Image (tube, coloured by chain):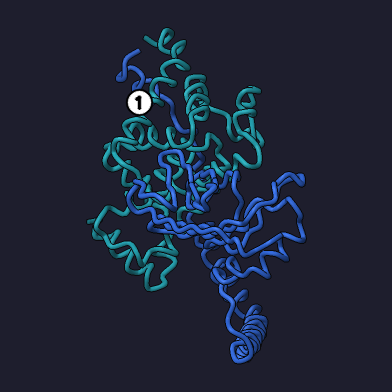
Amino acid sequence: MGEPDELNWIQNSLAGDKEAYAALVKQYQKMVHALTFRMTGSLDDAEDLAQETFLRAYQQLDSFRGEAKFSTWLCKIAVNLSLNWRTRENRRSDIHAKWSEGAILENDGRNKFSDELTHRVQKALNKLPAKQRAAIVLTVYENRSHAEAAKFLNCTEATISWRVFAARQKLKRWLKPISHEQL
Amino acid sequence: MNNSELESILKKAQVPERPNEFWEMFPRQVVRRLGHTQTQSSRVEWRWFPRLAWGLATAICVLAAFAIGHWHGRLETKTITSNDILQNPKLIRETLGMFPNQVRAIVQDERGLNLVLSEGENVPASAPLYIHICDGKHCSSLVTFSGQEIQIAGQKLTVLSEAQGGIILMGNQFVWSSTAQTHIRSGLKIEARNLNSITL
């Protein structure tokens, strides 16, 4: 169950209080942005997806039963929207092309990464198939168990374990030069 | 590199910082979009209301006309079902006459009635064969000819007619004959007969 404030915000939001919902957004905006950024590698897309996540959550708020934490519920919406975003994005163009061209500066320079390591890690994450990336984002960055990740992504625990395994193999290969520099 | 080393590298990658103003503005942007979405959806509902009403009225008229026509038709003629079509000599003869030596099969399944044509006029003239297959979930019926390879009820089958008038179906995992007791996979029901009466 959530914190007392959180429950009040949810109840008031359900009653149509937009300010209460704004408080919920404020509480979880950084978490959702971080997740959508890891999934997309673009600040602009992360922002769009974060907005979509909160809009979707508001529309489905009456289906939130409080069995899981609100943050867990939001996380599930965000990761699934990100997967669908990848599907749409794949149809239009491939973000990997931007990365391979070394386009670090995008969107008026707002995507400038704080350091080289972040850039290289995010580049490697972006090269993963979306479902493998989602498995890594959930298990590594969101500290979810394989069982929880499986529930988020509507698949079996074994599937998540396989995706994590496959993703790790690739990431180890792509990030090998970093490990030599860092370790 | 082991798993914990990889995880350590992954976690060192920071999400780019956003200015405080961004985090101040973001909840307001979401709330503004909530209002916009709601207003827009209510506007859409009202804009669509007259069209929806007209659409419903048209649909009711079409349904009424169809029901009357169907009822009238039932009084005048016997209903022709799909299976009737596949066993109706006149209809089959006319279909075959339209595409001489090109019709490989006339198939009836849940998707409707389909004509399988050969690109050239290379289907040998022979007596049509009627086949009905059910696999427990789906049923398909077809009229085809000896020597044709067909896809039916999820099975790829070669159809052959025997000199004595029997029909043989050869699948990937079974052989079935209309004249002999043969073992086929459970759940698969086959009925086949020679439509000798239809002369081409």
| Shade of chain A as shown in the rendered figure | cyan
Residue B25, can we see it?
no
Q: Position of residue B79 (x, y in %)?
A: 58, 81
* Figure check: A52 above or below B20: below
* Figure check: B80 above or below B161: below
* Figure check: A162 above or below B54: above
Residue A144, can we see it?
yes
- Callout 1 environment at 10 Å: few (<14), some (14 to 19), or many (20+)? some
Q: Position of residue A4 (x, y in %)?
A: 24, 60
* Figure check: B41 above or below A180: below
**Under tag 1, what secondary structure?**
helix
Looking at the image, how many numbered discs can be counted on the residues? 1
| Shade of chain B as shown in the rendered figure | blue
Instruction: Return the residue nearer the eye: B12 or B24.
Output: B12
Q: Quadrant of the C terminus of chain A?
A: top left
Instruction: Return the residue nearer the eye: A130 or B9.
Output: A130
Amino acid residing under circle 1: Phe
Quarter of the image for residue A1 reads: bottom left
In the displayed structure, does residue A154 sit left or right of residue B35? left
Residue at 55% of width from left, 58% of height from top? B194
User: What residue did someone put label 1 on?
Assistant: A165
